[in-house]
Image: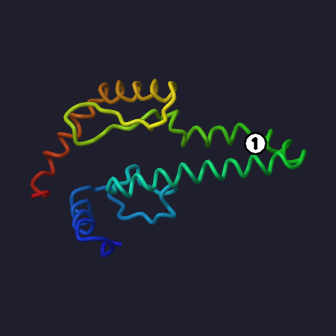
């Protein structure tokens, strides 16, 4: 929906559509966790709100499921059977497993981690930093920006 949002969003949409061959367009909020996009772009306020909402929702949902499971023995048995699948899903979205994410816009490797990161999350953030160095992240981003710099002006 290229006509929605502020002028900044509309202009960004046009630019992305023109310059990025794999750009899929805007993503509805309900599809954020189940879409074909590898990268979601938003401003910092919206991004932080989405992350905090997702954290709160998954914590609440997990607590409700645990509460229900503890109510019946048959639920406990069933939960034991699907526990490995639930662990895989949890790990897919667990910030501790991912550690952190690169902070873009600085000329170097900087990894942003959750404010309440555990030692495991910090360790994984260090791994993310090393992987970013190994894959020449800064050089690749710089090259990509220079390829499209004319379109930005």
Task: Give the residue furthest to the bottom.
Answer: 3
How has the structure been colored for display?
A: rainbow
Instruction: Say how many tags the image has.
Output: 1
Mark 1 residue crowding within 10 angstroms, few (<14) / some (14–19) / many (20+)? few
Q: Position of residue 34 (x, y in %)?
A: 52, 56
- Image coordinates of residue 122 in percent, x first then y, are 45, 27
Q: Kindly identify the residue that appears in the image at 54 percent across and 43 percent down.
A: 93
Instruction: Name the quadrant containing residue 99.
Output: top left
Closest to the observer, 76 or 46: 46
93, above or below 44, in the image: above
Left or right placement of residue 60 versus residue 142 in this view = right
Which of the pair 47/10 is nearer the observer? 47
- Near-viewer residue (71 or 4): 71
Quadrant location of the C terminus?
A: bottom left
Q: Dot 1 corresponds to which residue?
A: 82
Residue at screen point 17% across, 46% down: 145
Q: Locate the N terminus and report the quarter of the image it occupies.
A: bottom left
Query: Residue drawn at (50%, 38%), measured in percent from left and top?
Result: 95
Q: Quadrant of residue 150?
A: bottom left
At x 52%, y 33%, the residue is: 97
For the view shown, which residue lies furthest in the right direction?
A: 73
> Horizontally, is 130 left or right of 143 in the view?
right
The x, y position of residue 71, in whole percent, is 86, 49
Give SS at disc 1: helix
């Amino acid at each position: 929906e290229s006509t929605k949002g502020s002028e900044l969003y509309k202009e960004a949409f046009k630019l992305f559509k023109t310059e990025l061959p794999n750009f899929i367009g805007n993503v509805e909020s309900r599809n954020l966790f189940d879409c074909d996009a590898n990268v979601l772009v938003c401003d910092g306020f919206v991004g932080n709100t989405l992350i905090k909402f997702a954290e709160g929702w998954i914590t609440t949902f997990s607590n409700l499921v645990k509460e229900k499971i503890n109510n019946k023995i048959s639920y406990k048995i069933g939960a034991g059977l699907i526990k490995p699948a639930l662990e895989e899903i949890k790990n897919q979205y667990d910030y501790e497993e991912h550690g952190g994410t690169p902070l873009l816009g600085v000329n170097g490797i900087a990894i942003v981690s959750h404010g309440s990161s555990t030692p495991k999350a910090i360790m994984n953030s260090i791994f993310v930093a090393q992987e970013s160095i190994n894959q020449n992240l800064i050089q690749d981003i710089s090259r990509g920006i220079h390829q499209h710099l004319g379109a930005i002006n």
